[in-house]
Image (tube, rainbow, N blue to C red):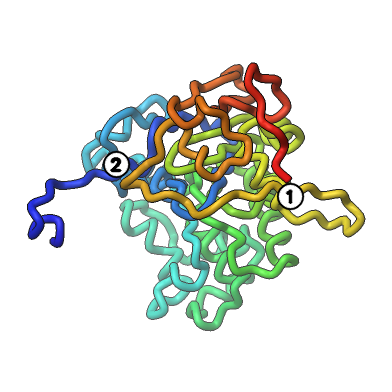
Amino acid sequence: MLDRLRGRGRQDIEAVAGVSLRVEQGSTYALVGESGSGKSTLARAIVGLVAVAGGSIRFEGRTIASAGQSDLRAVRRDIAIMFQDPIGSLSPRRSVRSILSEPFKVHGVDADLSQEVARLLTQVGLSPDFADRFPHQLSGGQARRVGVARALALRPKLVIADEPTAGLDVSVQGELLNLMNDLQAKLGVAFLMITHNLHVVRHVADRMGVMYLGRLVEEGATGPIFEQPRHRYTQALLAANSEPDPDADVQRLPIRGEVPSLIARPSGCEFHPRCGFALDICKTKLPELTGADGIRAFRCHNPAGVKTAETVPEPA
């Protein structure tokens, strides 16, 4: 409204820019990055909750980025979402039975709902007696299991899990991750996981992508990225990850300042104002995607572990 009063035109925000990734059947792909990096926006775009300005999103050969409502309805039966807040994502006025029955009713699936609810609860390690409980009668771990059951109700092929371990005790996190691994092995479902928890990523993800200001700066198999990150942002994130060994020699790589505004993206490499390894070229030229060999790809003019023509000293 203020922009209109001042005679300014509409400003478009490029929340996700040039992201390319592939989630294989039965695998787990993790998206990591600071808050505001575009992870959740990308997830919402996949299920059609956010319109895309360009590019394509394909699911099992079907283009869904520009699909109509009828086509999206069919796709949403095969793509489910686990929401971040385990309690807040469940309606406080509805019983667990009603919550788990809803997907069948929405998609017009003819089934014995009592039998399906009991099956789903048993599948996630809860007694069928939980069907008569309400969300406020559930612990955080139990509510998360109900969320998993709801996501798997129609046997989807892809589940988007938004911060699945957020707000849970470490022991409960472990139980949930083991449950998801077991269900994946049993059902062959793929997970696209959005998380800040790098320990979780290392434990469960086959591949991972690191996002910064809506752009994928490093992507590939999880093992090689953890062992030798190439992009300086990835390197800093992993260095900041706490180690369980108190005697471990951990080298911290500070990230300067705050995340820039999407309205005023920095020129060149968007991470250069916060990077201790920035070169002159980083300020003017966006790095090309390097090493797109299926194992790892990254965008960095001065990557870690790779010699460049111009170098800068290690930050103190």
Residue located 51% across and 29% down the image: 282
Q: Amino acid at mark 2?
A: Leu
Q: Quadrant of residue 78?
A: top left
Residue 314 visible in this rendered orientation of the protein:
yes
Q: Earlier in the sequence, mark 2 or mark 1?
A: 2
The residue at 62%/58% (across/down) is 123
Which is in the foreground here, disc 2 or disc 1? 1
Type of amino acid at the residue the image marks with label 1: Arg
Q: Is residue 47 above or below residue 106?
A: above
Q: Quadrant of the N terminus?
A: bottom left
- 109 lies left or right of 223: left
> Where residue 221 sits: x, y (%)?
66, 31
Q: Name the one closer to the observer, 45 or 258.
A: 258
Counting other residues with Cα less than 10 Å from the Cα at mark 2, is it few (<14), some (14-19), or many (20 or more)?
some
Give the residue displayed 31% in from the left and 49% down from the top: 49
Residue 8 % position (x, y): 12, 50
Q: Give the residue displayed 43% in from the left and 68% down from the top.
A: 99
Image check: 21 left or right of 181?
Answer: left
Where is residue 199? Give x, y as percent. Answer: 71, 51
Q: Nearer the viewer, residue 135 or 186?
A: 135
Q: Is residue 311 left or right of residue 98?
A: right
Q: Which mark is residue 252?
A: 1
**Label 2 sits on residue:** 72
Residue closest to the eye, 53 or 61: 53
Percent of width and height locating residue 307: 70, 20
